Amino acid sequence: MTERRALGRSGLTVQAVGLGGMPMSIGRDGPSEADALSALHAAFDAGTDLVDTADVYCHDDSDIGHNERLIAKAVKSWPGGGKVVVATKGGLTRPEGRWERDARPEVLRAACERSLKALGVSAIALYQLHAPDEKVRFADSVGELKRLKDEGKIRHVGLSNVGLEQLDEALAIVRIESVQNQLHPKDRGDLDDGLVKACAARGVAYLPYCPVGGGYGHISLSKHPTLMALAVKHGISPYCVVLAWHLAQGENVIPIPGASRVESAVDSPKALSVRLEPSDLAVIDALA
Ligand SMILES: NC(=O)c1ccc[n+]([C@@H]2O[C@H](COP(=O)([O-])OP(=O)(O)OC[C@H]3O[C@@H](n4cnc5c(N)ncnc54)[C@H](OP(=O)(O)O)[C@@H]3O)[C@@H](O)[C@H]2O)c1
């Protein structure tokens, strides 16, 4: 039940369904540390070896790095944890719990240094610009990531919340291995405008975020009658139906469903056991 996909041209391969750490660290009613570690260990036991995090997966600026520290603890306390690819991001802040963009070069550098400490590593496997900052020249933000890579603090560079023009601008500055954007059956913009395929053509992995509908959206999406019927047909959960739809969009697509519970963490990789038929894909496409 495993399928591995390339993380761009980095030389790294990962199980084709990863895990997003955000739900473990942003809600006031999130899991206890013990429960979050159990969910992460259960995911690793199920073969998950790509975990997405960010310095800002926390309550506010007072506990920046919360999710990174949690993931570092899970990786260190799991046999074989050294093989897990931990991808983090910089370029946002959390004043009083708000999400704000700040991708000035000096801010990115400070964030990267802090993430290195939070993760307890000497180099970050995949460091992603969380989002372009309209107050900063995009080339300046990406240029700082190139410098951090040249200095060995970052092994590979990724982008998030970008379009094709920005991807191409960044590729002219530094090798980009991944693009992380929102994609799910009801928000399929990057499929319709060709970004997913454009990434494939450039050897760039595409990591769909909020793949099963996001923090609240996942509840209604997973109860959609079409997805529930396909779930019965294939003997998997409606969540896995959606993740199998992602996997069918291209060999470069690696969804990163979020999880805060063991049940979710062990269920999502089961999407790898199913190949949806063209007729199944067509009915999911029609949900948009
Ligand atoms: N780059 C960006 O700007 C950006 C923005 C948003 C998210 N992200 C990243 O993308 C990841 C995924 O997005 P997301 O977490 O917001 O939304 P999501 O993956 O669409 O949905 C997350 C919620 O769905 C539930 N879920 C997922 N798989 C399930 C399964 N197989 N069975 C039952 N429930 C399941 C989880 O519930 P439980 O919590 O109850 O387990 C989880 O909280 C994030 O964790 C984060 O790493 C990036």
Image (tube, rainbow, N blue to C red):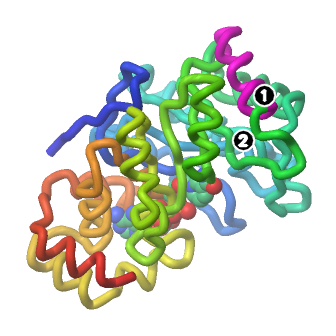
Q: Residue furthest bottom?
A: 225
Question: What's the residue at 42%, 57% (across, down)?
Answer: 194
- Residue 24 visible somewhere in the drawing: no
Neighbour tally class for label 2: few under 14, some 14-19, many 20 plus, Cα within 10 Å: many
Task: Return the mark for residue 191.
Answer: none
Q: Is mark 1 within 8 Å of ligand 1?
A: no
Instruction: Residue 56 in the image: state x and y as whole percent.
Output: 74, 48
Please provide the residue range marked out in magenta.
140-153
Q: Amino acid at mark 1?
A: Arg
> How many numbered dots are placed on residues in this image?
2
Q: Amino acid at mark 2?
A: Asp
Q: Are marks 1 and 2 in contact (CB under 8 Å)?
A: yes
Q: Is residue 151 left or right of residue 198?
A: right
Q: Which residue is mark 2?
A: 55
Q: Is residue 164 above or below residue 143?
A: below
Question: What's the residue at 28%, 38% (across, down)?
Answer: 47
Q: Is residue 123 left or right of residue 145?
A: left
Q: Quadrant of the N terminus?
A: top left
Instruction: Residue 275 in the image: state x and y as whole percent.
Output: 12, 59
Instruction: Residue 232 in the image: state x and y as whole percent.
Output: 13, 79
Question: What's the residue at 26%, 80% (across, down)?
Answer: 227
Instruction: Residue 28 in the image: state x and y as whole percent.
Output: 72, 66
- Residue 162 visible somewhere in the drawing: yes
Q: Which residue is mark 1?
A: 114
Q: Earlier in the sequence, mark 1 or mark 2?
A: 2
